[in-house]
Image: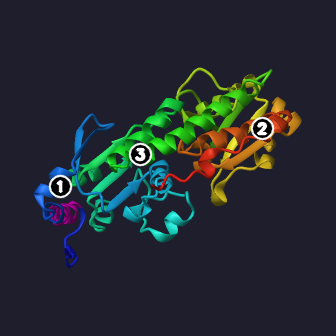
Amino acid sequence: MNCRMPAPRTTGVLLGVTLALAAGLCVSAVPFAAARAESIVVHDARGRDVAIGNRSRIVSIGGAITEILYALGLEDRIVGVDTTSLYPPKALGEKPNVGYMRQLSAEGVLGLNPQLILAIEGSGPKETLEVLDAAKIPFVSFPETYTEQGLIDKIKMVAHAMDADARGACLTAAVSGDLAELKKLRDNVKKPARVMFVMSFLNGRAMVAGHKTAANEIIKLAGGVNAVDGFEGYKPVNDEAIVAAKPDVILTMQRGREQLDAQTVFANPSFALTPAAAKKSFVAMDGLYLLGFGPRTAAAARDLALSLYPDLTDKAATWKPATLTVDCHK
């Protein structure tokens, strides 16, 4: 069926509603009996039971969601991704881009005529979600829980939404195996390193990670401890707090031209007084790999652990993360 329509001349919310109606008509054109026969109900992060029928045209929002879909061999169903979908690298190259996950345009998403939208929790804004809901296209929001179990649950939920539970079982087995190997490696850590994750500098103050963040959890998975305590989320901290935290290592993420480097961080007077500066201990890793909590998380934690504890290199030599090579496409 050809669902293409001439572009409406309206703008803003009216355009969104117009496209929503168009998309809704396209979805409703799927034979009702066939849709009901394939229907799967998923309870999502917004507390809703979402009935999913047609999965042939998907917009994937969130780097981890896209990575899971590719790992399951379902990339041929994807008709659009967001800007955080950086892995595999070809995703953004071969799929239309609907923008940043927190600044989505309803027109951009609906213009791709999706029959299913899979989005990580926190996608938005609210106004866009309202238009997408009005389009009557199944929209599944996946919980963003930065734990080992949360990672496993996310993979299972994506696979179930795609009616690919067997492939999901294959991928979760590989991830579970990698997490078990990671624990064995972590058990060899004698003295946990105090790690401070620095997101950026805002008006001269460092934006760092507290509890209940992806950074906090990846540090724990790697056998370290967060040098920052007393708050949740990402917040700017003053010079006194940085010195008092006494980080052994500064961790940050690589992100294009704006990424931090060791010279910039340790040139800051407060960071210059830390144990990390004395040892020039600075680690920068790819942002999605480090913080995405997708299938490669155990591998990322392994790489971080080896940066924190080089003496573990020999013990990790025989472990090749299964998720980097496993084939769960059948």
Give whichever of discs 3 and 2 has the lower sequence position.
3
The residue that label 1 is drawn on is 35
Magenta: main secondary structure equals helix
Identify the magenta region. Answer: 13-24
Placement of 14 over or under 61, stated as above or below:
below
Residue at x 58%, y 29% (from the top left corner): 210
Q: Which mark is residue 166?
A: 3
Q: Is residue 91 visible?
A: yes
The residues bearing labels 1 and 3 have C-alpha atoms spaced at a distance of 21 Å
Identified by mark 3, the residue type is Ala
The residue that label 2 is drawn on is 316
The question of residue 16 being in magenta is answered with yes
Do tag 1 and tag 3 residues touch (Cβ < 8 Å)? Answer: no
Give whichever of discs 2 and 1 has the lower sequence position.
1
Q: Residue furthest bottom?
A: 6
Mark 3 or 2: the one toward you: 3
In the image shown, does 206 or 19 lie closer to the viewer?
Answer: 19
In the image shown, does 237 or 97 lie closer to the viewer?
Answer: 97
Q: Decide: few, some or many residues near mark 3? Use Cα within 10 Å; few <14, some 14-19, many ≥20.
A: some
Placement of 227 over or under 13, stated as above or below:
above
